[in-house]
Image: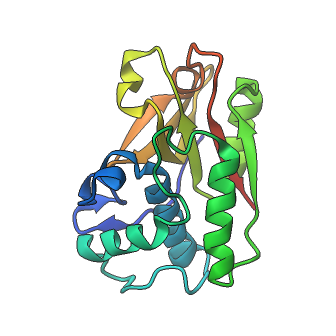
């Protein structure tokens, strides 16, 4: 079984990227804000929510997207330790949505310690319901995950096989498929997790 959510382009990029941001902290630590920007645009484009993105939605330019990232910045402000807990993300993004009168989207944390089988099920449920999934990875031992250490990104697709589940991740203006068992089993006691929308 395979399911991928629609996603927008920013010029030729697949979603946004913190690397476009000209200021130091957003450039190195704006990943939480960028995932919230991507989710907000998905809500506008595919969930019929209005008033979240302040620019033209039918052709999203890099300049407009970067401007939007700085609208989001006060809500998910980069900091020295990063936005390293799910509750910080939920509080900031909820405040952004409420300030724009979108009060019918709720967020629930899914802790990174949860069982992988249950995590597979909740990812399938979210994607099948049309919700992108913000994901936080803190430390990780696998070399494939080196670009995802202490990083927020989006899961917006899955494919299941007999004994494997692949997930499609979105970050840095591109996408990549990972074996969920690799992504989820970080090898460290301190975990990140998922944000679930409803």
Q: Is residue 57 left or right of residue 39?
A: left
Query: 160 and 14: which one is in front?
Result: 14
Q: Residue at x 30, y 77 (%)?
A: 64
Query: 38 and 47: which one is in front?
Result: 38
The quadrant the N terminus occupies is top right
Q: Position of residue 23 (x, y in %)?
A: 27, 58
Q: Residue at x 56, y 19 (%)?
A: 186
Q: Residue at x 25, y 70 (%)?
A: 62
> Does any portion of residue 171 appear in the rendered image?
yes
Quarter occupied by residue 106: bottom right
Q: Position of residue 136 (x, y in %)?
A: 56, 39
> Does any portion of residue 127 appear in the rendered image?
no
Q: Is residue 4 left or right of residue 89?
A: left
Q: Position of residue 146 (x, y in %)?
A: 37, 25
**Residue 59 drawn above or below residue 130:** below
Q: Residue at x 35, y 55 (%)?
A: 26
């Amino acid at each position: 079984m395979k399911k991928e959510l629609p996603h927008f382009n920013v010029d030729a990029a697949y979603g946004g990227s913190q690397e476009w941001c000209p200021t130091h902290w957003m450039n190195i630590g704006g990943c939480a804000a960028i995932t919230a920007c991507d989710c907000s645009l998905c809500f506008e484009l595919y969930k019929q929510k209005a008033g979240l993105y302040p620019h033209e939605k039918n052709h999203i330019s890099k300049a407009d997207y970067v401007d939007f990232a700085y609208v989001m910045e006060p809500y998910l402000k980069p900091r020295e330790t990063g936005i390293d807990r799910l509750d910080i993300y939920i509080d900031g993004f909820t405040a952004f949505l409420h300030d724009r009168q979108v009060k019918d989207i709720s967020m629930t944390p899914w802790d990174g310690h949860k069982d992988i089988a249950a995590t597979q099920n909740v990812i399938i449920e979210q994607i099948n319901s049309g919700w992108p999934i913000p994901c936080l990875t803190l430390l990780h031992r696998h070399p494939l995950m080196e670009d995802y250490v202490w990083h927020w990104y989006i899961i917006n697709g899955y494919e299941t096989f007999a004994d494997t589940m692949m997930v499609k991740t979105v970050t840095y203006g591109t996408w990549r498929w990972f074996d969920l068992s690799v992504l989820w089993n970080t090898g460290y006691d301190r975990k990140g997790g998922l944000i679930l929308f409803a």
